[in-house]
Image: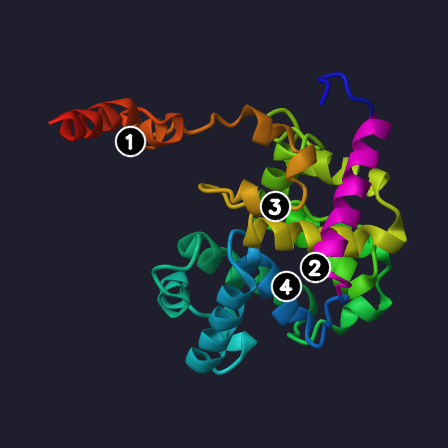
């Protein structure tokens, strides 16, 4: 892909990726938000973690704490231990979750978050972006799923996948800049679907350390695949492919027949 690709070029590329992934994964369902507090916690937990990991983490939190208010007043160390040592970024997330809950509680004296029912889409996003240690990704997720805002949350997974595909440039664009670009590039009716499909690709194939490019449905249009060096065949495989050594065997066989 050209380094001078225009906004329109990238928007079209992103839509092509969406269609390719939709054919692979099928229709996606909009997240069902039954409890905004739990949804906010899941948003924080989800970065760099699979859906199965997040589900197990939420179950452990439910087991180890009386409720969301108990989680709010708990120490990060206790939350980290509940998440487990192998959970991605456990220490960071164990600090941010109670910090977010405590800030909202002190403003509204409630853990129900029914104030969202009267808060507009844009205002909801601005509200959560204004809280300490709440990243734009989390604020956008809450605003989109809890208030119906036009938002495309960008975490490390989304930035990695769309960076490799040539849609974003995580090296030069900040998180808010990437979100702004994607929200301009994707229609409101498709934005939730596009986001979930990209997250699915990040979890299944476009892994951080060992991307499975050979199985990726979008590999034909991915410039990162072209740049990835090909593995050189071993001497044994190379000899087998070229037939090296065969003339020597035939020479021995002929010599034996002459004797």
Q: Quadrant of the C terminus?
A: top left
Residue hosting label 2: 25
The residue to which callout 1 is attached is 236
Numbered circle sitting on residue 216? 3
From the top left corner, tell me how far across and down residue 43 is, in percent: 61, 59
N-term mark: 4 or 2: 2
Measured from the top left, where is residue 74 in percent x and y? 43, 69
Q: Is residue 161 magenta?
A: no
Mark 1 and mark 3: Cα distance apart in space? 29 Å
Query: In the shown orientation, is residue 12 left or right of residue 233?
Result: right
Q: Name the foreground residue: 188 vs 141.
A: 188
Which quadrant of the view contains residue 231?
top left
Kindly state the secondary structure of the residue where label 3 is placed. loop
Under circle 4, the secondary element is helix
Instruction: Tell me the SS state at disc 1.
Output: helix
Q: CA distance from mark 3 to mark 2?
A: 12 Å
Q: How many other residues sit within 10 Å of disc 3, few (<14), some (14-19) or many (≥20)?
A: some
The question of residue 18 being in magenta is answered with yes
SS at mark 2 in the image: helix
**Which residue is nearer to you in this view: 221 or 199?**
221
Q: Would you say residue 67 is visible in this rendering?
A: yes
Tag 1 and tag 2, C-beta contact below 8 Å: no
Q: Residue at x 84, y 38 (%)?
A: 185
Looking at the rendering, the stretch of residues picked out in magenta corresponds to: 7-28
Residue 165, percent from left and from top: 66, 34
Q: Disc 3 versus disc 4: distance between alpha carbons?
A: 30 Å
């Amino acid at each position: 892909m050209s380094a001078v690709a225009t906004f329109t070029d990238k928007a079209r590329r992103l839509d092509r990726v969406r269609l390719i992934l939709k054919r692979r994964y099928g229709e996606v369902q909009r997240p069902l938000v039954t409890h905004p507090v739990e949804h906010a916690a899941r948003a924080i937990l989800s970065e760099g973690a699979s859906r199965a990991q997040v589900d197990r983490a939420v179950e452990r939190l439910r087991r180890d704490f009386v409720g969301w208010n108990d989680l709010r007043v708990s120490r990060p160390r206790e939350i980290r231990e509940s998440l487990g040592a192998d959970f991605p970024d456990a220490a960071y997330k164990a600090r941010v979750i109670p910090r977010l809950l405590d800030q909202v509680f002190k403003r509204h004296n409630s853990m129900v978050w029914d104030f969202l029912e009267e808060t507009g889409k844009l205002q909801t996003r601005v509200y959560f972006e204004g809280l300490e240690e709440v990243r734009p990704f989390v604020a956008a997720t809450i605003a989109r799923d809890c208030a119906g805002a036009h938002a495309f949350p960008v975490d490390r997974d989304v930035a990695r996948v769309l960076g490799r595909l040539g849609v974003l440039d995580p090296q030069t664009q900040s998180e808010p800049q990437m979100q702004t670009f994607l929200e301009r590039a994707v229609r409101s009716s498709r934005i939730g679907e596009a986001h979930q499909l990209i997250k699915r690709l990040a979890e299944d194939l476009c892994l951080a350390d060992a991307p499975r490019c050979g199985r990726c449905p979008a590999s034909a249009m991915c410039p990162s695949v072209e740049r990835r060096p090909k593995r050189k065949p071993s001497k044994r495989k190379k000899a087998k492919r070229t037939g090296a050594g065969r003339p020597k065997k035939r020479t021995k066989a002929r010599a034996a027949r002459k004797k």
